[in-house]
Image (cartoon, rainbow, N blue to C red):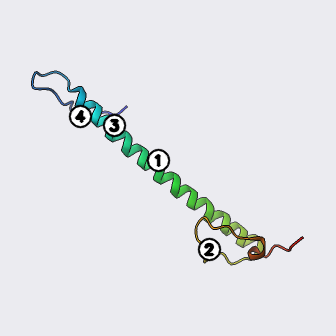
Amino acid sequence: MWLVEQISRTPAGKADYRWARRYAEEQLAVTQEHAATASAQATVAQTTDAQTTVAQTTGADTTNAAPGAEVTDAEAGVPGN
């Protein structure tokens, strides 16, 4: 639900439902775009946090790792089986 300061009216003075629908669809698109951006930013932050944790616990250097890139056991300094 979105609140507006003024409702668009038709020339006859009735509520303009076409305007209301367009407004709601535009607001929904903006809301969904913001949600997608926030989700992508959270994913990058989680990946960066995970890489930092791996580096701190293993002494690995992940400073040049791309966001979302996986660090292999060998890169992380984890001994093999």
Q: Secondary structure at mark 2?
A: loop
- Farthest residue to the right: give it: 81
* Amino acid identity at mark 4: Glu
Q: Position of residue 63 (x, y in %)?
A: 62, 77
Residue 60, percent across and down?
A: 72, 76
Q: Are marks 1 and 4 in contact (CB under 8 Å)?
A: no
Q: Disc 1 versus disc 4: distance between alpha carbons?
A: 25 Å
Q: Disc 1 or disc 4, which is closer to the eye?
A: 1
> Vertical placement of 75 versus 2: above or below?
below
Residue appearing at x 34%, y 34% in the figure: 2
Category of crowding for the residue at label 1, using alpha-carbon neighbours closer than 10 angstroms: few (below 14), some (14–19), many (at least 20): few
Q: Nearer the viewer, mark 3 or mark 1?
A: 3
In this view, 6 is above or below 40: above
Residue 52: where, in percent of width, then height? 66, 69
Mark 1 or mark 4, earlier in chain: 4
**How far apart, in angstroms, are the residues tagged by discs 1 and 2?**
26 Å
> Which quadrant does the N terminus fall into?
top left
Residue at (55% x, 56% y) in the render: 42
Measuring from the top left, give residue 17's x and y in whole percent.
Answer: 24, 26
Q: Amino acid at mark 3?
A: Glu
